[in-house]
Amino acid sequence: METKEWRIFNPEGTKRVIVTKELPGQRWLDILEAAGCRVEICTSAAVLDIDKIQAAIGKQCDGAIGQLTEPWGEVLFAALRVAGGTAYSNYAVGYNNVDLDAATEYRIPVGNTPGVLTETTAEMAVALTFAAARRLGEAERYLRADLFDGWLPTLFLGNLLWRGTLGVIGAGRIGAAYARMMVEGHKMDVVYFDLFPNEQLERSIETYSAYLESQGEPPVNCRRADTLEDVLKTADCVSVHTVLDASTHHLINTPRLALMKENAVLINTSRGPVIDEAALVDHCRIHPEFRAGLDVFESEPALAPGLAELENVVIVPHIASATSWTRQGMATLAASNVAGLLSGYPAWNRPDISGFLEGEFPKAAPSILNAEELQIPLYPD
Ligand code: DGY
């Protein structure tokens, strides 16, 4: 039954899908309707707790689209399974809120939304980089407070990053896109740390460097560091692009912050707990020339005590993927994951998901994280 909190779309649909937040765009709803789904959407902006989600799953539920703010683990996957559910998609590329082992145990395939956030998130990392290096937050607050009395040679001196060294921690899709934006736009050298080499990134920077030389300009370099410490010591600006798991929790901590240049810039658009936020607050207090740009926080939506008061930190509320195109694309992918699974389609097995975003999309679920474990066939096979 429709309530103030839950809106029903396509009530005649025979497969019941719950969606724990309103999502932008129309295509995602059309996809679910075409797959015969009745879609129940929670209209509340409040983060749903586990009991509310469990109540929404109820006695019969075929699939769910959930948020990165919700704990999709043992309890919810068990409830979904008992309700007859066979599909879940996170409305995010990151899935540290999902217990994949529990989902697999309850035979629930889990989708995520890669590919549509890459450039958008990288753009935000670039925006935070310059906002932090050039002290935009401080300068704007100063101006709005009516403190600007006229141009001064020493007003808000920041750091020039052009031709400096960029450190990238985690050179996957987003880290590599950010690196290319900073290299091709800003001619920085790159030193990156990743468990795996990113040969495509290295090749593209080599090609760009050859072009620069052909124009009589100095080259740019890209190298993969053997250690994280090497990146931290060397770079003028370090941007974090790792997943969050046990191995990356507090990857940036007090001893590692101490390795960084005193006037370095630290950017995080990945997940908050990758940085020990209390340690960062202490570090920024002691080193006023050090600057940070953060989109994500350790205990969102709360900020570590003292963080909001620091002038040398730029903070935005987890909006790195917040463009209409990307958020609509994420909705399309999440809906296609659930619709594809409920239609018995195979899992897509290529990195390029652009074919799902407009026109007729492949008869496949675009990104299923535990497809192999659940022996879901791959498309095309
Ligand atoms: C994600 O998708 O993981 C982002 O953090 C939100 O867009």
Image: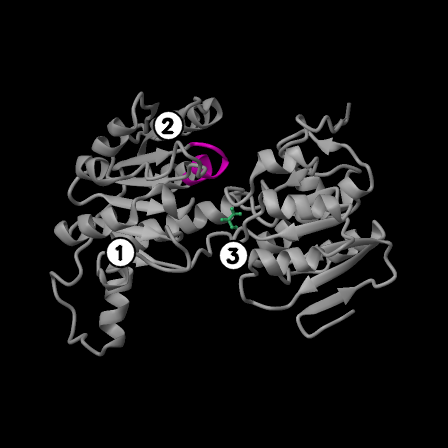
Residue 294 in view (yes/no) = yes
Q: Is residue 151 above or below residue 136?
A: below
x and y percentages locating residue 229 in the rendered image:
25, 28
Q: Are marks 2 and 3 in contact (CB under 8 Å)?
A: no
Q: Which amino acid, mark 1?
A: Val
- Few, some or many residues within 10 Å of mark 1 (<14, 14–19, 20+): many
Of callouts 3 and 1, which one flags the residue occurring earlier in the amino acid sequence?
Answer: 1
Res. 17 image quadrant: bottom right
Res. 263 image quadrant: top left
Queried on whether the Cβ of the residue with tag 1 lies below 8 angstroms from ligand 1, the answer reads: no
Q: Is residue 39 left or right of residue 12?
A: left
| Residue on which disc 2 sits | 209
x and y percentages locating residue 329 in the rendered image:
64, 50
x and y percentages locating residue 147 in the rendered image:
18, 76
Of callouts 2 and 3, which one flags the residue occurring earlier in the amino acid sequence?
Answer: 2
Residue 361 in view (yes/no) = no
Q: Which amino acid, mark 3?
A: Ala
Q: CA distance from mark 1 to mark 2?
A: 33 Å
User: Which of the pair 180/271 is nearer the observer?
Assistant: 271
Labels 1, 2: front one: 1
Q: CA distance from mark 2 to mark 3?
A: 32 Å
| Residue on which disc 3 sits | 322
Queried on whether the Cβ of the residue with tag 3 lies below 8 angstroms from ligand 1, the answer reads: yes
- The disc placed on residue 313 is 1
Q: Is residue 172 magenta?
A: yes
- The local secondary structure at tag 3 comes to loop
User: Which of the pair 320/14 is nearer the observer?
Assistant: 14
x and y percentages locating residue 352 in the rendered image:
64, 35
Q: Which residues are magenta?
A: 171-178
